[in-house]
Image (cartoon, helix red, strand yellow):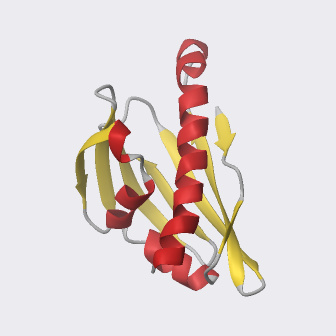
Amino acid sequence: MEITSKKHEINAKVERVILFLSDLNNIEKLLPKDKISEWKSDTDNCSFKVQNTATISLIKKEVGENKIHMTSGEKSPFPFKLDVNITENGEGSFGEIHFDGEVNAFLKMMVERPLTSLFDYMSEKLKIEMEKS
């Protein structure tokens, strides 16, 4: 199952956005606080519980010029890849999140809509966080 978030314009250069995202401690700032609990993180890993259901863990695998590539950790309910793609846009940039998960048809029906909403929320929050700093 693949999901790509809405693309948001970010008022920050690509390098600054990549630097922010390369520290997985910052992922917490992009998540809806009322829907997550049990947050744990360091610069290369993070994990959290989603609405008292599944625990999701992320591992930073690669930081490129325009992309952060992460994969699921052992606590995640299914294997997935998560890429945050940042492209240049004049004085700023565009950001979007791409998810590729190995889920069966039944699970897809349950998680596709909430994950799409989550990734759209996260890409919007990235825009807001970069405007703060």
- 15 or 69, which lies in front? 15
Residue name at image x 48 percent, y 69 percent? 129
Total labels drawn? 0
Within the image, what quadrant is residue 97 found in?
Answer: bottom right
**Up-down relation of residue 42 to residue 82 (above or below):** below
Residue name at image x 41 percent, y 46 percent? 32
x and y percentages locating residue 68 in the rendered image: 53, 65
**In the displayed structure image, the side of residue 56 where residue 5 appears, left or right:** right
x and y percentages locating residue 16 in the rendered image: 53, 83
**In the displayed structure image, the side of residue 92 where residue 63 appears, left or right:** left
Q: Seen from this angle, which residue lies furthest right? A: 90
x and y percentages locating residue 52 in the rendered image: 28, 27
**In the displayed structure image, the side of residue 95 where residue 129 appears, left or right:** left
- 34 or 26, which lies in front? 34
Which quadrant would the N terminus be assigned to in this image?
top right
Within the image, what quadrant is residue 20 found in?
Answer: bottom left
**In the displayed structure image, the side of residue 86 where residue 77 appears, left or right:** left
Within the image, what quadrant is residue 54 found in?
Answer: top left
**Up-down relation of residue 92 to residue 38 (above or below):** below
Residue name at image x 38 percent, y 50 percent? 58
Q: Seen from this angle, which residue lies furthest top? A: 106
Which quadrant would the C terminus be assigned to in this image?
bottom left
**Up-down relation of residue 24 to residue 1 (above or below):** below
- Is residue 74 visible in the rendered image? The answer is no
- Is residue 84 visible in the rendered image? The answer is yes
Residue name at image x 70 percent, y 50 percent? 6
